Amino acid sequence: MVTVLAIIGIVLMILCFLIGLALSIFGLPGVFIIALGYLVYGLFAKDISWLIFITLVVLAIIAEFIEWIMGLYAGKKFGSSTEGLIGAIIGGIVGAIVGVPLFLIGSVVGMLIGAFLGAFLFELISAKDSSKALKVAVGVFIGNIGGIFIKIVIAILCIVIVLVHIF
Protein backbone atom coordinates (compact mmCIF):
# COMPACT_ATOMS: atom_id res chain seq x y z
CA MET A 1 0.00 0.00 0.00
CA VAL A 2 1.30 3.43 -0.95
CA THR A 3 1.47 5.82 1.98
CA VAL A 4 0.93 9.55 1.97
CA LEU A 5 4.64 10.03 2.67
CA ALA A 6 5.53 7.86 -0.34
CA ILE A 7 3.24 9.97 -2.55
CA ILE A 8 4.89 13.17 -1.26
CA GLY A 9 8.28 11.57 -1.93
CA ILE A 10 7.28 10.69 -5.49
CA VAL A 11 5.98 14.20 -6.17
CA LEU A 12 9.16 15.80 -4.81
CA MET A 13 11.29 13.34 -6.76
CA ILE A 14 9.49 14.11 -10.03
CA LEU A 15 9.92 17.82 -9.33
CA CYS A 16 13.65 17.28 -8.78
CA PHE A 17 13.82 15.22 -11.98
CA LEU A 18 12.24 18.04 -14.00
CA ILE A 19 14.46 20.70 -12.43
CA GLY A 20 17.55 18.50 -12.83
CA LEU A 21 16.80 17.84 -16.48
CA ALA A 22 16.21 21.54 -17.15
CA LEU A 23 19.45 22.48 -15.41
CA SER A 24 21.34 19.87 -17.44
CA ILE A 25 19.98 21.37 -20.66
CA PHE A 26 21.53 24.68 -19.59
CA GLY A 27 24.86 23.05 -18.74
CA LEU A 28 24.34 23.30 -14.99
CA PRO A 29 24.83 20.41 -12.52
CA GLY A 30 21.31 19.02 -12.84
CA VAL A 31 22.29 15.38 -12.53
CA PHE A 32 23.10 16.04 -8.87
CA ILE A 33 19.54 17.36 -8.41
CA ILE A 34 18.22 14.14 -9.96
CA ALA A 35 20.26 12.13 -7.42
CA LEU A 36 18.92 14.37 -4.65
CA GLY A 37 15.38 13.70 -5.89
CA TYR A 38 15.91 9.98 -5.51
CA LEU A 39 17.33 10.49 -2.02
CA VAL A 40 14.30 12.59 -1.03
CA TYR A 41 11.95 9.92 -2.38
CA GLY A 42 13.86 7.22 -0.50
CA LEU A 43 13.69 9.10 2.78
CA PHE A 44 9.96 9.76 2.46
CA ALA A 45 9.01 6.30 1.16
CA LYS A 46 11.59 4.46 3.27
CA ASP A 47 12.62 2.66 0.08
CA ILE A 48 16.14 3.55 -1.00
CA SER A 49 18.91 1.56 -2.56
CA TRP A 50 22.19 3.09 -1.49
CA LEU A 51 23.87 1.36 -4.42
CA ILE A 52 21.57 3.18 -6.84
CA PHE A 53 22.07 6.48 -5.02
CA ILE A 54 25.86 6.10 -5.14
CA THR A 55 25.59 5.15 -8.83
CA LEU A 56 23.62 8.34 -9.49
CA VAL A 57 26.20 10.47 -7.70
CA VAL A 58 29.05 8.81 -9.61
CA LEU A 59 27.18 9.37 -12.90
CA ALA A 60 26.66 13.02 -11.92
CA ILE A 61 30.40 13.44 -11.33
CA ILE A 62 31.16 11.72 -14.63
CA ALA A 63 28.66 13.99 -16.43
CA GLU A 64 30.30 17.13 -15.03
CA PHE A 65 33.77 15.86 -15.92
CA ILE A 66 32.76 14.90 -19.46
CA GLU A 67 31.10 18.25 -20.04
CA TRP A 68 34.19 20.08 -18.85
CA ILE A 69 36.68 17.98 -20.79
CA MET A 70 34.76 17.84 -24.09
CA GLY A 71 35.48 21.47 -24.99
CA LEU A 72 39.17 21.02 -24.34
CA TYR A 73 39.30 17.73 -26.21
CA ALA A 74 37.51 19.16 -29.24
CA GLY A 75 39.76 22.24 -29.17
CA LYS A 76 42.80 19.97 -29.22
CA LYS A 77 41.30 17.92 -32.07
CA PHE A 78 40.81 21.15 -34.01
CA GLY A 79 44.51 21.97 -33.60
CA SER A 80 44.61 24.10 -30.48
CA SER A 81 47.86 24.95 -28.78
CA THR A 82 48.19 24.85 -25.00
CA GLU A 83 47.71 28.62 -25.00
CA GLY A 84 44.41 28.25 -26.86
CA LEU A 85 43.15 25.70 -24.32
CA ILE A 86 44.20 27.96 -21.45
CA GLY A 87 42.33 30.79 -23.16
CA ALA A 88 39.24 28.59 -23.45
CA ILE A 89 39.34 27.80 -19.73
CA ILE A 90 39.91 31.40 -18.68
CA GLY A 91 37.33 32.69 -21.15
CA GLY A 92 34.77 30.13 -20.00
CA ILE A 93 35.21 31.06 -16.35
CA VAL A 94 35.11 34.81 -17.02
CA GLY A 95 32.12 34.40 -19.36
CA ALA A 96 30.21 32.35 -16.81
CA ILE A 97 30.81 34.98 -14.13
CA VAL A 98 29.89 37.89 -16.42
CA GLY A 99 26.76 36.05 -17.58
CA VAL A 100 25.39 35.41 -14.07
CA PRO A 101 23.09 38.49 -14.05
CA LEU A 102 21.10 37.02 -16.95
CA PHE A 103 18.64 34.71 -15.24
CA LEU A 104 19.46 30.99 -15.41
CA ILE A 105 20.95 30.78 -18.91
CA GLY A 106 23.32 33.73 -18.60
CA SER A 107 26.18 31.81 -17.06
CA VAL A 108 25.91 29.05 -19.66
CA VAL A 109 25.73 31.45 -22.60
CA GLY A 110 28.55 33.45 -21.03
CA MET A 111 30.62 30.29 -20.59
CA LEU A 112 30.09 29.23 -24.21
CA ILE A 113 30.86 32.68 -25.62
CA GLY A 114 33.73 33.23 -23.18
CA ALA A 115 35.36 29.89 -24.01
CA PHE A 116 34.99 30.63 -27.72
CA LEU A 117 36.50 34.13 -27.40
CA GLY A 118 39.21 33.00 -24.99
CA ALA A 119 40.30 30.19 -27.28
CA PHE A 120 40.20 32.49 -30.29
CA LEU A 121 42.17 35.34 -28.68
CA PHE A 122 44.82 33.18 -27.01
CA GLU A 123 45.26 31.08 -30.14
CA LEU A 124 45.48 34.24 -32.27
CA ILE A 125 48.15 35.69 -29.98
CA SER A 126 50.02 32.38 -29.93
CA ALA A 127 49.81 31.34 -33.58
CA LYS A 128 49.17 34.72 -35.20
CA ASP A 129 46.86 32.95 -37.65
CA SER A 130 43.23 34.10 -37.56
CA SER A 131 41.87 31.17 -39.58
CA LYS A 132 43.52 28.66 -37.22
CA ALA A 133 42.32 30.62 -34.20
CA LEU A 134 38.76 30.60 -35.54
CA LYS A 135 38.94 26.86 -36.25
CA VAL A 136 40.12 26.18 -32.69
CA ALA A 137 37.40 28.42 -31.21
CA VAL A 138 34.72 26.63 -33.23
CA GLY A 139 36.13 23.30 -32.01
CA VAL A 140 35.92 24.42 -28.39
CA PHE A 141 32.34 25.61 -28.94
CA ILE A 142 31.31 22.32 -30.59
CA GLY A 143 32.96 20.37 -27.77
CA ASN A 144 31.13 22.38 -25.12
CA ILE A 145 27.78 21.79 -26.84
CA GLY A 146 28.65 18.08 -27.15
CA GLY A 147 29.47 17.95 -23.45
CA ILE A 148 26.09 19.44 -22.58
CA PHE A 149 24.39 16.89 -24.85
CA ILE A 150 26.19 14.00 -23.12
CA LYS A 151 25.20 15.42 -19.73
CA ILE A 152 21.54 15.44 -20.84
CA VAL A 153 21.83 11.79 -21.93
CA ILE A 154 23.33 10.87 -18.54
CA ALA A 155 20.54 12.80 -16.76
CA ILE A 156 17.91 10.82 -18.69
CA LEU A 157 19.77 7.59 -17.92
CA CYS A 158 19.70 8.42 -14.20
CA ILE A 159 15.96 9.07 -14.32
CA VAL A 160 15.39 5.75 -16.09
CA ILE A 161 17.53 3.89 -13.53
CA VAL A 162 15.44 5.32 -10.69
CA LEU A 163 12.10 4.67 -12.38
CA VAL A 164 13.06 1.07 -13.14
CA HIS A 165 14.05 0.61 -9.49
CA ILE A 166 10.85 2.14 -8.12
CA PHE A 167 8.34 0.71 -10.54
Image (cartoon, rainbow, N blue to C red):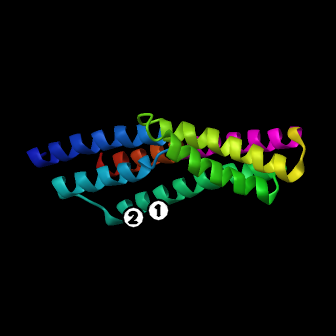
* Residues at marks 1 and 2, CA–CA distance in whole angstroms: 6 Å
Q: Which residue is painted at 41% across and 57% down in the image?
A: 56
Secondary structure at numbered mark 1: helix
Q: Are marks 1 and 2 in contact (CB under 8 Å)?
A: yes
Q: Is residue 23 left or right of residue 165?
A: right
Name the kind of residue labelled 2 in the image: Ile
Q: Which residue is painted at 47% across and 35% down in the image?
A: 105
| Residue 135 percent coordinates (x, y) | 82, 40
* Location of mark 2 (residue): 54
Q: Is residue 42 left or right of residue 138?
A: left
In depth, the one of 124 and 165 nearer the eye is 124
The stretch drawn in magenta includes residue 132: yes
Which secondary structure type mostly characterizes the magenta part of the structure?
A: helix
As drawn, 141 above or below 58: above
Q: Which residues are magenta?
A: 131-151
* Location of mark 1 (residue): 58
